[in-house]
Image (cartoon, coloured by chain):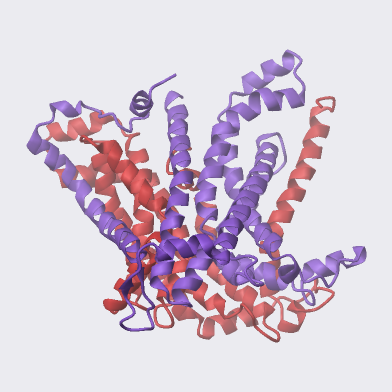
Chain colours: A red, B purple
Amino acid sequence: MRTYTPLRSKVLWSVVGWLVVFVFFFPVLWMWLEAFKTEPQAASSPPTIFFTPTLAEFQEVLSGDFPPFFINSAIASLVSTFLVLVLGLPAAYALAIRPVKRTQDMLFFFISTRFLPFAASLVPLYLLARDLQLLDNILALILIYTTINLPLGVWLLRSFLLEIPNDLFEAARVDGAAFRHEILRIVVPLIAPGLAATSLICLIFSWNEFFYAVNFTSSVAATTPIFLVGFISGRGLFYAKLAAAATVSSLPVLLAGWIAQKQLIRGLTLGAVK
Amino acid sequence: MKTGSSILRSVGIGGARDSAASISGRDAWARRLPLLPAFIYVFLVTQIPFVLTIYYSFFSWNLLKPGSFRFAGLDNYVTLVTDESVRTAVLNTVVLTVCVIGISVVLGMAVAMILNSEVFGKGLMRTLMIAPFLIMPTAGALIWKHTLLNPLYGLLPWVLSPIGLGRVDWVSRFPMATVVTVEVWRWTPFMMLIILAGLQSQNPEVLEAARVDGANGLQVFRRITLPLARPFIELGALLGSLFVVQTYDSIYMLTYGGPGEDTTNIPFLLYKVAFQGYSIGQASAIGVVAVIMTIIVATFALRTLLSIFQVEARR
């Protein structure tokens, strides 16, 4: 196995690796290529490989009925992420720095709610939303996404807080810093990476969420994935428009994930893997 | 062997930084206070609906028929056992989850090993590799369905036509295989990321020593790499299965549970029963069963999570 010279083995494994990566990345690349084509080019057989890129489909998507969906997604994701941080940071703080009895039960309680399937609460939540006139209201999605992401937020923020040396808090307490100041002045700057990781994970899950979005909204509060439902059984030429819409829809999470790759692993494993 | 509580203490889960016993009652409440808003919120939005789900599961109730709400005892659960489509959905859920997790763990392990060795452009490879996981699942599924797999205009049938596989309608002829493929495409990067983190935590000197001692590649893999990566593989597989069990987006987009019920899994069946059949009681019973299935998987997942925290704490 190790009879190759290091360089030959390096070249060999690089080629194998790049082939595998190409296969996995190809659907994304193809989506991008299709988005810059005209409709006839996008659905041609044999496929059009060389073409003059056009922004026509992007213009059509962005000037059509797409923007409200995108804005709804942004509101639902950003507000729910903000709520997760506001509710989750004090909770994580209590669980990490100032532990009480039953800390462990509390942690398990939080995480068990994340792994409760949506099937467990879908019907009552739907009936409740209906009775409160919250169907097709962005507020319903905000509240649900906050619930989905809060357990992750608490676990993740706690794992970052545990890394702060206890002496810092002791020093602050000796100084007589009030609890609120303690959080704002000491904790927040130190766990900026933790806040970033938590926001990223919340953003990914709420931006891409489909189940509640499709069943709780119809037109006014519908989010980006719902816009794509219109392409399920489209007739005629729509590939380029689909690809353009898919590209724009995926862009925020793709960029955020690429920029914060380090935080991604830690976030996905609830802080277990650094 | 460590006892459970000592494991917990070593990861700082149960343990207090200062002894909990020394905290006076009033102080304990002050310490608990920041926890309450999050706790109350999560409790209200998850636990009360769940209790209602259990409650509804003993009733027969069609949402479209006012006044149809009546006690039904165990009827909904009897239907679950006798109904063919429930059995199909359970089976489809198991097949989908086992295939997706199995295949994506193996592929993820392979890619992680390549990225952990000396190769050109590691960072860029990793960046491109995680894209499928970040793409919106509904968008990814539609790109696969239309631009890649469509028998007339898709890319894959054209690529495969020289070997006689052109014009195959993959989505309707092999619906489950299509859903599995799209989900594997999405979850392999997830597995790769977690396993790669595990591989990178191993000490390269151990590998060197093993080679100096004359171990071949296969031996190094079986005796050193695999045992070290194992907790990370388990973590990835279990976290992944908690998500894959709930697969809904790609089924909705690719096959809509069909043809017939060939790709209807539990979440999709629940959707059909609740929002197309409007049978609230029946849907609730399905929900209860889904929770029981999830608890079984989640128990293992949490145990694995704890063992990882333990490994991390020892470093």
Image point 54% across, 33% down: which residue? B231
Residue A104 in the figure: left or right of residue B2 = left
- Residue B48 % position (x, y): 27, 59
Q: Position of residue A72 (x, y in %)?
A: 41, 74
Question: What residue is shown at x 54% (from left), y 70% (from top)?
Answer: A249
Position of the N terminus of chain A by quadrant? top right
Frontmost residue, B22 versus B132: B22
Q: Nearer the viewer, residue B175 or B131?
A: B175
B82 vs A104, nearest the viewer:
B82
A104 to the left or right of B215: left
Judging depth in this view, the residue of B238 and A206 nearest the camera is B238
Q: Position of residue B82 (x, y in %)?
A: 53, 63
Residue B199 in view (yes/no): yes
Q: Quadrant of residue B64?
A: bottom left
Q: Is residue A195 visible?
A: no
Instruction: Return the x and y of residue B210 as percentages of the image width and height.
Output: 69, 17
